[in-house]
Amino acid sequence: MEVKQNNDEKHGSFEAFIDGISAGKMTYTWAGEERFIIDHTEVAEEYNGKGVGKEMLLAAVDFARKNEKKIIPLCPFAKASFQKSKELQDILVN
């Protein structure tokens, strides 16, 4: 699985590809320069249960850590994932 990031001044996304086919997309909106809001996660039905959402979330966390950004998880999937994984919570907005 490959996750690619698209980013501009206001919005961005992490898109997962399996064998070159789009398997899912996680979108975000910038909330200032230091944080972004994960607002939607979608996984293609045929890829449900294959860890696509988790891989996109981990890519978002990696991006946030490397760039000293914080994440606000509004999307239900992202919010639930952060609640389950204490090791990811360092990049959440307090």
Image (tube, helix red, strand yellow):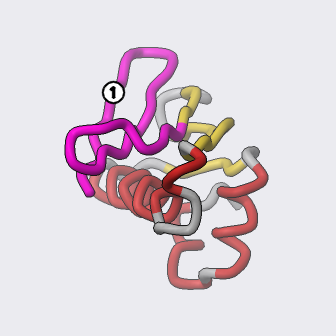
Q: Position of residue 44 (x, y in %)?
A: 54, 43
Element type where label 1 sits in the image:
strand
Percent x, y for residue 2?
24, 51
The magenta stretch is 1-26
Residue at the outermost top position:
9
Name the residue at 52% across, 74% down: 88
Nearest to the observer: residue 44 or residue 14 = 44
| Quadrant of the snapshot with the N terminus | bottom left
> Residue 23 in magenta?
yes
- In the visual, does 1 lie left or right of 44? left
At a point 27% along the width and 56% down the height, the residue shown is 66
Which residue occupies 51% across, 83% down? 87
Depicted 50 relative to depicted 74: above or below: below
Main secondary structure of the magenta stretch? strand
Percent from the top left, x then y, of residue 49? 56, 68
Q: Magenta segment: does it hold 46?
A: no
Determine crowd level at label 1: few under 14, some 14-19, many 20+ residues with C-alpha closer than 10 A: few
Q: Is residue 18 above or below residue 79?
A: above
Instruction: Between residue 45 and residue 28, name the one nearer to us.
Output: 45
Indicate the quadrant containing the C terminus: top left, top right, bottom left or bottom right: bottom right
Please, what is the three-letter code of the amino acid marked with disc 1?
Asn
Instruction: Residue 58: give x, y in percent of width and height.
Output: 42, 63
User: Which residue is pictured at 30% across the width and 38% down the height?
Assistant: 21
Q: Which residue corresponds to mark 1? A: 6
Query: Against 85, is 1 above or below?
Result: above
Give the quarter of the image for residue 17.
Answer: top left
